Image (cartoon, helix red, strand yellow):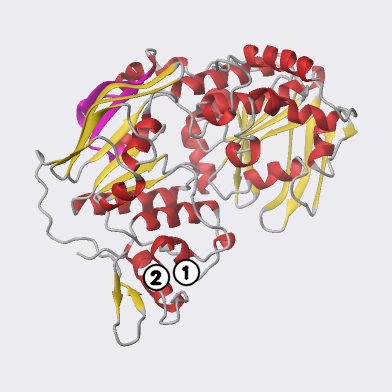
């Protein structure tokens, strides 16, 4: 079995060529074969013990889930395996050799490949160049041998059954396609251990099926997989064992077929999953409530004549498959993207935004799906992030630093943002607390209409419960809330009504007893 990162060099021409990486055939995997063993791993930061005496073992050819709340230590542990962090104490045995720490080059050399939740790809390069970015073949003159790169990438994508032309620029791809390119990139080198961090975040059903098929085939050839996901249902679909982290400790490792979802949840957060959703359905008639009307929003084939209304105190959900036009609609409502038609009417007044700053001044808030790229300044303090939206609404050119710190501290405390100080950089917070910071900035700006786009993607079960409680409280205060979610149980348990989009159109609006998983899926998939 050859590594595609190995280049065959033609001595006469001086060119290098990539060789496609095939799945191995006839690999015999013994259950007792341990490919990686971590012992007594410690890692601390000022005021936080991220990992405390953690043991972990991974068998050859197994798919092992790693679960826990944000802040449980999962990310710290996989960054140690990837060589990005060094443990304070402990050892890792792999390939019969014991290491105190890795660096990224050693980790890759040992066959550890990591696919992060956020795509780490270069926008202006082609799919093929991204896949082989660290080992691009060269011509005799030192230029990139693009034809060979494309040919080899096409062979790899075909083998993985990913239908994406490798000569395409990354900017031409959808989010789902980019995620699949990240997966292919991990397979471009000879991997022994594949770490997948929230791999299905925002993938549609087809993308998820492709991914799962790739994982199963790879595991059958002896590849070991560490699978991190907050979608616990996926664990029972794809994984052999599950390890649970909590507050930096390893709580348990068990075989998936011998455990239950409720047991995993209880070990993660100490309470039943039935307590996660807290919304009490609104009991408001159209006559006694102010209403937001979304009227005939359209843009090409992405969104086609979508209209609906939302009352104050109501949580309105938007469901449908990824690519159905939900996010495109939200971005048009907020004035981020151009539209062919559409009006936004609030309490009988036309408030259609012409730009995001206009939307903010008119009381709209948009919590984007990609909070790290679009919603936060990661290397700035919490209080600055919370203050940013308010500055769009006020005319003053200067910040009263002391006053802003006091005001943002109040909002931070109201939302229970877990941090030693509001001067803490946002990048140091867990995903759940980062999402709270995004929400805090809109509340600080006194937004009356809030659009949540995938509010709990990449957030642990405990933080989900807190986000649901916050949305419920905001609805009770009379805010208008629109929630876009690919998580059907989330829509069912948190929303008063749910509109289902399909191919850019609003297929139907469900309410009351109509809001069932069967109805949501049926309408999303177009099943009569």
Q: Residue at x 33, y 23 (%)?
A: 245
Mark number displayed over residue 165:
1
Q: Which label sits on residue 501?
A: none
- In the rendered structure, are the residues bearing label 1 and label 2 in contact, judged by CB atoms less than 8 Å apart? yes
- The residue tagged with tag 2: helix, strand or loop? helix
Is residue 290 located in the magenta-colored stretch of the structure?
no
The image shows residue 291 at horizontal and vertical percentages of 80, 27
Q: Is residue 65 above or below residue 55?
A: below
Name the spot of residue 293 as percent of width and height, x first: 79, 34
**Residue for point 78% across, 43% down:** 335
Q: Position of residue 11 (x, y in %)?
A: 29, 83
Magenta region, residue range:
237-261
Q: Secondary structure at mark 1?
A: loop
Name the residue nearer the viewer: 354 or 417.
Answer: 417
Q: In this rendering, is residue 255 above or below 237?
A: above
In screen coordinates, is 504 left or right of 269? right
Report the front residue among 144 and 124: 144
Q: Please determine whether, in this image, residue 96 is positioned above or below residue 510.
A: below
Task: Say if residue 344 shows up in the picture.
Answer: yes
Mark 1 crowd level (few <14, some 14–19, many ≥20, 10 Å Cα):
some
Label 1 to label 2: alpha-carbon separation: 7 Å
Q: Which residue is mark 2?
A: 154
Quadrant of the frame with the N terminus: bottom left
Decide if residue 261 is on the left or right side of residue 327: left
Q: Along the horizontal axis of the image, is 496 left or right of 164? A: right
For the question of whether residue 506 can be seen, the reply is no
Asked where in the image residue 76 lies, by quadrant, the reply is: top left
Q: In this view, which residue lies farthest toward the bottom? A: 12
Q: Residues within 10 Å of mark 2 (few under 14, many from 20)?
A: many
């Amino acid at each position: 079995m050859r590594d595609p990162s190995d280049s065959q060099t033609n001595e006469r021409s001086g060119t290098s060529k990539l060789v496609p990486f095939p799945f191995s055939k006839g690999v015999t995997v013994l259950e007792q074969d341990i490919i990686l063993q971590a012992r007594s791993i410690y890692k601390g930061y000022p005021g936080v013990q991220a990992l405390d005496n953690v043991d972990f073992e991974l068998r050859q050819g197994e798919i092992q889930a790693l679960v826990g709340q944000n802040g449980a230590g999962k990310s710290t542990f996989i960054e140690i395996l990837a060589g990005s962090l060094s443990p304070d104490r402990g050892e890792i045995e792999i390939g019969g050799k014991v290491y105190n720490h890795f660096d990224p080059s050693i980790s890759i050399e040992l066959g550890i490949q990591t696919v992060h939740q956020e795509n780490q790809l270069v926008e202006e390069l082609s799919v093929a160049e991204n896949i082989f970015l660290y080992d691009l073949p060269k011509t005799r003159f030192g230029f990139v041998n693009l034809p060979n790169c494309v040919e080899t990438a096409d062979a790899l994508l075909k083998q993985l059954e990913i239908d994406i032309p490798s000569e395409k620029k990354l900017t031409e791809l959808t989010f789902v396609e980019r995620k699949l390119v990240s997966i292919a990139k991990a397979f471009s080198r000879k991997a022994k251990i594949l770490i997948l961090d929230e791999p299905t975040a925002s993938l549609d059903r087809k993308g998820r099926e492709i991914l799962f098929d790739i994982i199963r085939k790879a595991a059958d050839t002896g590849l070991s997989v560490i699978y991190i996901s907050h979608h616990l249902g996926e664990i029972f679909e794809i994984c052999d064992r599950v390890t649970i982290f909590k507050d930096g400790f390893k709580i348990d490792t068990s075989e998936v077929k011998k455990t239950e979802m409720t047991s995993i949840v209880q070990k993660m957060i100490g309470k039943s999953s039935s307590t996660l959703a807290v919304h009490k359905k609104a009991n408001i008639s159209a006559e006694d409530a102010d209403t937001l009307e979304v009227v005939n929003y359209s843009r090409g084939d992405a969104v086609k004549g979508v209209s609906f209304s939302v009352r104050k105190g109501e949580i309105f959900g938007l469901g449908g498959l990824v690519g159905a036009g939900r996010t495109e609609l939200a971005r048009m409502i907020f004035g981020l993207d151009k539209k062919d038609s559409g009006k936004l009417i609030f309490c009988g007044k036309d408030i259609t935004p012409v730009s995001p700053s206009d939307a903010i001044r008119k009381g709209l808030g948009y919590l984007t799906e990609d909070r790290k790229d679009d919603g936060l300044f990661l290397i700035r303090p919490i209080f600055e992030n919370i203050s940013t939206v308010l500055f769009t609404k006020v005319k003053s050119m200067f910040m009263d630093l002391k006053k802003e710190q006091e005001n943002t501290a109040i909002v931070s405390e109201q939302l229970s943002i877990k941090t030693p100080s509001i001067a803490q950089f946002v990048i140091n917070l867990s995903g759940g607390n980062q999402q709270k910071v995004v929400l805090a900035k809109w509340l600080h700006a006194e937004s009356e209409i809030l659009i949540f786009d995938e509010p709990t993607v990449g957030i642990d079960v405990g933080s989900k419960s807190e986000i649901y409680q916050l949305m419920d409280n905001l609805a009770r205060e009379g805010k208008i809330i629109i929630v876009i979610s690919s998580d059907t149980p989330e829509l069912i348990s948190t929303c008063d009504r749910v509109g289902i989009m399909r191919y850019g159109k609003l297929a139907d609006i469900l309410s009351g007893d109509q809001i069932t998983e069967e109805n949501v899926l049926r309408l999303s998939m177009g099943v009569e």
